[in-house]
Image (cartoon, rainbow, N blue to C red):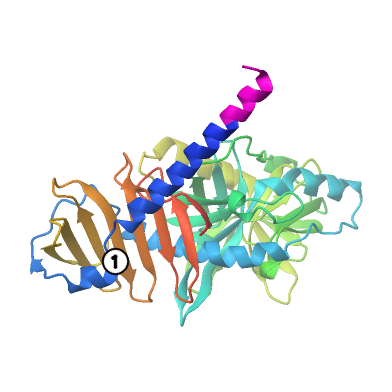
Amino acid sequence: MRPIALLGYLACAISVFWITQQALAQSASAELPNLAELKATSYQRTVQPELASVPTYQDLMNTIRLAEAYSRGKRLLPNYHEPILTRGTSGIGVFRNVAPSVVLVVVGEVKNKEFEPSGLGAGVIINSSGDILTNWHVINGYSAALIFLKPPGGATMLDAYAYGARLIAQNETVDLALLRIAKPPSNLEHVSIGSISSVQVAEDIHVIGHPKGNLWSYTTGVVSQVRDGYDWTYSDGSKHEAKVLQLQTAINPGNSGGPVLDDQGKLLGLVAMGEEGQNLNYAIAADVIQSFLLRTASTSTRGGVTEANPPSAEYSSGRLQDDRAILKVTYPDLIEYVVSDAKGKTVGLVAEASNGTRVRAWESNSFSGFKEWEISLPGGTSVRARGSAEAPDQFSSN
C-alpha cells in the first residue's frame, strides 16, 4: 500500500474510532434514568452504605462550582487581547517570558442565579508538574479551583486552556496556598524563585495579574521596603503575619496571587494585599514562599489537604422497573441518585442541587469516579467534563 493511501486509511480509521467513541458515550448517557423517573421511584430509608465507589459530596459540589467557573471564564476570555506594552525592553521581555506561567484562578458559587466569584485571582506555575502558587485568601473555603492557562495572543481555543486543580497545601498565617493541576499539559512553562537577599530598596519590579478582571495585565513599580513580621487583617477577620515586600505599583483586586518579578523574571514575591487609596501594596517575600514549599514537600500526603466534613445526609434505596438499583442520598442542598445495574455495579450518577444545577455522570473509571460528566447550569448553560479521578479534571463546551 502506498504511503499516502496508508495515511488516508489511518485517518479514516481514527475518525471512525472517534465517532464510535462519541456515539458510545452519548448512548451510555441516554441509558441513565432522568430526574422525573428517579423522583417518581418509591424509596425506603436505609442505613448509610459504603460509598467508596462514588464521588463524595465535596467532589460533587466542587464539580458544580468548577462548571460555574468554567462558564464564567468562557465569557471572560474572549475579551482578552494581548496588551500593548509601552515599557522598555526589560518589561517587554519579562512579560513575554513569564506571562505563560501566570494563570487565572476562579472559584465561586451561584447566588440569585448569578455566578459570584468568591475567589478570582492569579496564580503562578512553579514547576512542570503543574503546581501553582496562589494566596490562601483566593482559595479559602474551597478544596479545588478552575485554572485557565494564558492563551497565546488570543482566546479562540478556550477549551484547551481550562483545567481542574486540587488544593494540596495551605498556610493561613502567611496567606499562601498550593494547587496542583489534575492532568497538566506537557511543556508547562514555570518561574524560578529568586533570593530575597538580593532585593534592594528602589529596585524595579514587574507584576502580572488580572486586576478587576482585566486578564494578564502588566504593571511595573519599585520595592519601597522589605518588612519582616508584618501583620495584616482581611475584611473576613482573618489575621496574617509574614515577611513582605512593600511595593509602589498599581495593585487592584484580581492581582492577588500574581508574581512580583525582578528584571530576570525571577519570583521575588506573591502579591497579597494593598491599602486602598494609599498606593501601599504588599507581596509575600520569596524566602517565606521557599519555606512554605519546603514544609509542604516534607509533610504532603497522597490525598492532599483534609476536606471539610460533609453535611448530614439521609439514605434511602429504591429499584427501577428494569431492576436497576437506586441509592438516594439527600443533603440539605443536594440530592444524589447513584445507579447500579442488576449485578450491583455502579454505572452512573444523577444529582440535582438546590439552585437547579443538574449533574449526570457515567462510564466508571478505576478511581471511584466517572469518565464522562455533564453539568446543566441554571439559565440553560451546559458544560461537559472528563475525569480520570474521583471528580472531573478537564472541562469543555457541550
Residue corresponding to mark 1: 34
The main secondary structure of the magenta stretch is: helix
**Residue 323 sits in which quadrant?**
bottom left
Horizontally, residue 80 falls left or right of residue 338, namely: right
The spot of residue 11 in percent (x, y) is: 59, 32
Q: Is 364 in front, or is 229? A: 364
Q: Is residue 197 above or below residue 237?
A: above
| 169, above or below 104, in the image | above
Judging from the image, what secondary structure is the residue with disc 1 in?
Answer: loop
Residue at the outermost bottom position = 112
Asked whether 295 falls inside the magenta stretch, the response is no
The answer to whether residue 336 is seen in the rendering is yes
Q: Would residue 254 be visible to someone looking at this image?
A: no
Residue 316 versus residue 372 in the image, above or below: below
Q: Position of residue 68 (x, y in %)?
A: 49, 66
Q: Which residues are magenta?
A: 1-10
Picture layout, residue 370 above or below residue 257? above
Q: Residues within 10 Å of mark 1 (few under 14, many from 20)?
A: few
Percent x, y for residue 54? 26, 51
The quadrant in which residue 79 appears is bottom right
